[in-house]
Amino acid sequence: MSEAMVGILLGILGAFLFGSSPIFARLGLQYVRTTTGTFTSLLAGSVLLGILAVPLHAREMLNLPVAALLWIALLGLLNFPLGRYFNFTAVRLAGVARATPILSTSTLFAVLFAIIFIDETPTLLTLIGGLLIVGGVVLTVSERK
């Protein structure tokens, strides 16, 4: 099997796992507060990551430049505790079917921040994709029950 095919299969598996996580969050949040669910999720993820990453990549971790460590620490602060807390709160309040498309606008924010902060140049297809994301969110938010 080619590397590209392995990458595609891993991408599909990742999409499946990311897609199933709001369901598990919604089920769990029926019994606990959002802060408890966020902490439990972060703890479980940290333990699993520690078991896998530290033994396999300890040397690389110790040799990271200080600037890289600071950026990664900022990412860890913003993405994991805050992002997951807001994600879980959105799923709890709006439901999986409404919150997940809105949370998927993270791609749009990534593109905008790449343009603003690291001078990336978007292609026409990237801009069209961004417009489609905005359109999908508008449709999701304007849906009437």
Image (tube, rainbow, N blue to C red):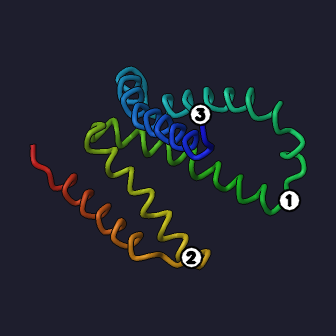
Residue at 71 percent across and 59 percent down: it is 71
Numbered tag placed on residue 120 in the rendering: 2
Residue denoted by label 3: 42
Numbered tag placed on residue 101 in the rendering: none
How far separated are the C-alphas under marks 1 and 3? 25 Å
Q: Residue 19 location in percent, x, y? A: 40, 36
Amino acid beneath label 1: Pro
Q: Tally the marks.
A: 3
Q: Nearer the viewer, residue 21 or 29?
A: 21
Residue at 50 percent across and 63 percent down: it is 110
Q: Earlier in the sequence, mark 2 or mark 3?
A: 3
Q: Residue 145 location in percent, x, y? A: 9, 42
Q: Viewer-nearest of labels 2 and 3? A: 2
> What is the residue that sits farthest to the left in this orientation?
145
Which image quadrant is residue 118 in? Answer: bottom right
Residue at 32 percent across and 61 percent down: it is 133
How far separated are the C-alphas under marks 2 and 3? 32 Å
Q: Is residue 68 above or below residue 45?
A: below
Numbered tag placed on residue 65 in the rendering: 1
Q: Is residue 122 above or below residue 33?
A: below
